[in-house]
Image (cartoon, rainbow, N blue to C red):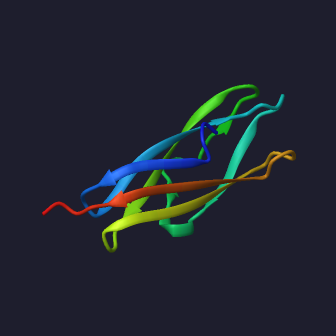
Amino acid sequence: LDSAIIDVGIQHNEGKVEHSVRLTNRTESPVKIVSISPRCSVRALDLKWEIGPKTSKILPLEIPVRGTPGTFKRRAEIYFDCPTQTKLEIFIQGRFQPSN
């Protein structure tokens, strides 16, 4: 993963923002994404793939933006079929500042 903390910056509209993360498989075997927990309503836009040995892939995420103005924080957990790392936690933050 490029970074376990993602800052999506200032968002002016309620709804969803898309952001991608790069996942890297450092093992000698393919790794499949098993699931992503829907914590804080973050969802992966595509889960039907595997990461080949010693390669990277981009995982697109959809992050909800809503609520009162100010800082928001979301979290997602991605589960793999890899024996050396079965779970990866991603923290997402940003600021909701509605346009007037």
- In which quadrant of the rendered image does the N terminus lie? top right
Q: Residue at x 49, y 63 (%)?
A: 73
Q: Residue furthest right?
A: 83
Q: Residue at x 68, y 26 (%)?
A: 55
**Toward the viewer: 97 or 22?**
97
- In which quadrant of the rendered image does the C terminus lie? bottom left
Q: Is residue 74 above or below residue 54?
A: below
Q: Residue furthest bottom?
A: 68
To which quarter of the image does residue 29 belong? top right
In the drawing, does residue 94 fall left or right of residue 47? left
Say how many tags the image has: 0
Q: Position of residue 46 (x, y in %)?
A: 52, 47
Q: Residue furthest left?
A: 100
Q: Residue at x 51, y 68 (%)?
A: 40
**Toward the viewer: 93 or 23?**
93
Q: Position of residue 34 (x, y in %)?
A: 70, 53
Q: Residue at x 65, y 57 (%)?
A: 35
Q: Position of residue 23 (x, y in %)?
A: 63, 38
Q: Is residue 8 above or below residue 38?
A: above
Q: Is residue 29 above or below residue 6?
A: above
Q: Residue furthest front?
A: 70
